[in-house]
Image: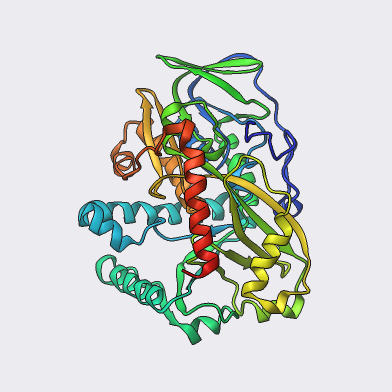
């Protein structure tokens, strides 16, 4: 079944802590009849909305088509962590690609964070950019590798915002005995993701973009111009941007071959009060080195927002809360009696190499997807990069699209069972501590 509808009610945000604490606008109209645009964007998440904002500010006529609501997908549900770099160590990217290309990619990732900070300050201050993301690892080797990465970043890129931490140093901040050490990156941050999406959508509209909700795209007829068709209308456009990420099923084979949808889940505890200080002693976010990563932070009302489970089928499992609670308590036994007040899931896009997939899938059609857990900053920046390419500035698109992102084995049809088998193996390794 289509992931757009398998786990959610059409046009309604999931019952998350984010939705309960955001000022959500009324639903926008859907596409009716035939309309024309310079650029048609499919998907009103961070990627599509950032592209719409940049293009509208440049005077282009922009129509954004969203199957549900702006910010409905991963952009309004994610862990809110704004990480540095990519889902690779930068030292490994330099070994793989060479110093010059790796440095260009690092500069893009730093610009992505700076853009996000500026957009929040300007358009969504209630999203609350809050500096600090810690990373914990479970082994001495993992700690040494992290510290070597921090030293590499400081020496080669002048990035001196990471504090390496031994076991005791990390425990002073993150009150679990599980980690052998890690680091604290004060150049990274965390935000309220749905408030940011709401503010970004309003900014795009104020600049002149038109966002049409309840407008699922069924097919795209390539050509110059292209024709983008929904159930009740058609947009004819000179350029098309595919920005649906994990919620873009089957529209374009080239995207489907490189980007696979997986589900991730988050729970929000009841307010912890003083118990929060026995979990985190600073207002930071945390992620760790499990293959099925644990990620968590405190909310403004002192709940623990804890994510740490994935699934690879289209449908969500029925036991989300018990499994999440068990993972949380395995790190923080002091929370054994704490209830989860909210539990929700969402779909994101991953790639074979866990690097973003930017590609030109037709002469006048681009796609940006597959952010693999690093999308809070990189997805919006990808939208900016595709907008720049449409405006004739292709430099950063060329840098990002050169990332090594092969097709999944078996292509779009057979990638899911093969990846599910591989992910199940890695999840087993996590449980066994391998």
Residue at 35% across / 34% down in the picture?
Answer: 389
Tell me which colouring the rendered structure shows.
rainbow
* Rendered position, 70 above or below 361: below
* Rendered position, 262 above or below 156: above
Which of 80/119 is in front? 80
Residue at 70% across / 51% down in the picture?
Answer: 344
How many labels were placed on the picture? 0
Residue 111 drawn at (x, y percent): 39, 53
Residue at 31% across / 45% down in the picture?
Answer: 404
363 left or right of 217? left
Which of 62/165 is in front? 165
* Rendered position, 362 above or below 118: above
Residue at 34% across / 68% down in the picture?
Answer: 159
Most extreme residue toward the bottom is: 168
Which of 128/292 is in front? 292
On the rendered image, what quadrant is the N terminus found in?
A: top right
91 left or right of 367? left
264 left or right of 22? left
Which of 132/403 is in front? 403
Picture quadrant where residue 286 is located: bottom right
Does residue 402 show up?
yes
Residue 297 drawn at (x, y percent): 62, 67
Residue 136 drawn at (x, y percent): 49, 72
Does residue 17 show up?
no
Residue 431 drawn at (x, y percent): 55, 66
* Rendered position, 244 above or below 282: above
């Amino acid at each position: 079944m289509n992931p757009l509808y398998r786990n959610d009610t059409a046009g309604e945000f999931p019952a998350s802590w984010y939705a309960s604490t955001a000022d959500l606008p009324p639903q926008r109209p859907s596409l009716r009849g035939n309309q024309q645009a310079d650029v048609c964007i499919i998907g009103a998440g961070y990627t599509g909305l950032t592209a719409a904002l940049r293009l509208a500010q440049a005077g282009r006529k922009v129509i954004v088509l969203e199957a549900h609501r702006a910010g409905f997908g991963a952009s309004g549900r994610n862990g809110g962590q704004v990480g540095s770099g990519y889902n690779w160590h930068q030292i490994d990217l330099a070994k793989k690609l060479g110093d010059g290309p790796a440095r260009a990619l690092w500069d893009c990732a730093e610009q992505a964070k700076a853009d996000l900070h500026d957009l929040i300050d300007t358009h969504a201050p209630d999203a609350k950019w809050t500096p600090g993301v810690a990373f914990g690892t479970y082994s001495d080797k993992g700690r040494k590798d992290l510290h070597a990465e921090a030293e590499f970043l400081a020496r080669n890129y002048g990035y001196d915002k990471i504090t390496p931490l031994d076991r005791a140093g990390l425990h002073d901040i993150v009150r679990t005995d599980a980690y052998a050490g890690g680091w604290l990156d004060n150049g990274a941050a965390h935000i309220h993701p749905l408030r940011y999406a709401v503010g970004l959508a309003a900014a795009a509209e104020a600049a002149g973009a038109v966002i049409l909700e309840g407008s699922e795209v069924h097919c795209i007829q390539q050509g110059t111009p292209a024709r983008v068709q929904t159930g009740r209308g058609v947009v004819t456009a000179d350029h098309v941007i595919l920005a649906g990420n994990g919620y873009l099923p089957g529209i374009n084979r080239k995207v489907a071959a490189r980007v696979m949808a997986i589900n991730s889940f988050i729970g929000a505890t009841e307010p912890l009060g003083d118990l929060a200080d026995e979990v985190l002693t600073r207002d930071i976010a945390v992620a760790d080195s499990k293959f099925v990563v644990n990620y968590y932070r405190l909310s403004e009302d002192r709940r623990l927002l804890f994510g740490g489970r994935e699934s690879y089928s289209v449908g969500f499992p029925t036991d989300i809360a018990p499994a999440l609670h068990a993972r949380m308590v395995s790190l923080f036994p002091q929370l054994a009696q704490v209830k989860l007040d909210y539990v929700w899931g969402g779909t994101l896009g991953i790639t074979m190499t866990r690097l973003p997939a930017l590609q030109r899938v037709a002469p006048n059609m681009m796609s940006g997807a597959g952010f693999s857990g690093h999308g809070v900053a990189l997805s919006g920046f990808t939208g900016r990069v595709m907008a720049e390419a449409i405006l004739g500035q292709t430099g950063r698109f060329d840098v990002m699209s050169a990332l090594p992102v092969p097709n999944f084995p078996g292509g779009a049809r057979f990638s899911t069972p093969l990846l599910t088998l591989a992910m199940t193996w890695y999840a087993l390794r996590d449980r066994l501590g391998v």
